[in-house]
């Protein structure tokens, strides 16, 4: 009887020692890292939004009759900057989806603006426009890098929230749930190679 009691105590001691790896601090750290990564994504989107009025004003001087395209870019920028997505709001997938759609709408509007620019060789040669276009291209690259970092941090965080035993700490002690990540808006368009005509 004494031997079985010692085994039980030893078993409980081993169990309690294994529970010290519950992941509380790891989950807290991952949550902060995902929030920081998200802040960088927002920072880059804001940089792009700040560049757009200057780009539109420069193009407007050359392509005044392209009013519809210019208004489309302005409207898309307004929609994209009108949605504020805080780390707390990231918990709502529908809000995250609206934010992502607004940013994709802005990217699409900027693509249409660049098509308009191709019609105006003088505009493409303009130093101010070239500088703005270069800054915008750099910002798009920064957005891509920031989104990638966020996606990586979310994947790491979500593993902690879903894997045992940290999932118990996440659910019952911290009340954490998986965070949404970026997705492709139109998977068919991505999987179809673009048609190039000369």
Image (cartoon, helix red, strand yellow):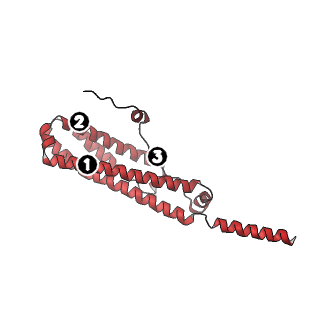
Residue 58 is left or right of residue 25, and the answer is left
Relative horizontal placement of residue 150, taking residue 62 as reference (left or right): right
| Residue at image location 66% in from the left, 65% down from the top | 18
Residue assigned mark 2: 115
* 3 or 2: tag closer to the N-terminus: 3
Between marks 2 and 1, how big is the CA–CA gap? 15 Å
Place residue 42 in its image quadrant: bottom left
Lateral position of residue 182 relative to residue 139, left or right: right
Q: What is the number of the mark on residue 190?
A: none
Residue 136 numbered tag: 1
Q: CA distance from mark 3 to mark 2?
A: 32 Å
Numbered tag placed on residue 94 in the rendering: 3
Q: Is residue 116 above or below residue 53?
A: above
Find residue 195 and report its horizontal and vertical position in percent: 32, 29
**Looking at this rendering, what residue extends furthest in the right direction?**
1
Q: Are marks 1 and 3 in contact (CB under 8 Å)?
A: no
* Residue beneath the point at 28% across and 43% down: 75
């Amino acid at each position: 009887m004494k031997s079985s009691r010692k085994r039980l105590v030893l078993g409980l001691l081993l169990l309690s020692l294994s529970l010290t790896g519950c992941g509380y601090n790891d989950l807290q750290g991952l949550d902060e890292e995902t929030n920081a990564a998200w802040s960088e994504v927002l920072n880059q989107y804001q940089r792009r939004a700040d560049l757009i009025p200057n780009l539109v004003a420069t193009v407007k001087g050359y392509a005044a009759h392209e009013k519809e395209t210019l208004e489309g870019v302005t409207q898309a920028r307004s929609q994209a900057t009108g949605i504020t997505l805080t780390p707390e709001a990231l918990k709502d997938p529908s809000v995250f989806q609206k934010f992502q759609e607004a940013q994709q709408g802005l990217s699409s509007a900027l693509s249409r603006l660049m098509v308009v620019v191709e019609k105006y060789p003088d505009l493409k040669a303009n130093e101010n426009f070239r500088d703005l276009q270069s800054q915008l291209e750099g910002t798009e690259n920064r957005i891509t890098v920031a989104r990638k970092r966020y996606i990586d941090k979310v994947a790491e965080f979500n593993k902690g929230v879903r894997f045992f035993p940290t999932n118990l700490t996440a659910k019952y002690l911290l009340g954490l749930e998986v965070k949404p990540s970026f997705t492709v808006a139109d998977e068919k368009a991505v999987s179809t190679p673009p048609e190039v005509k000369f």
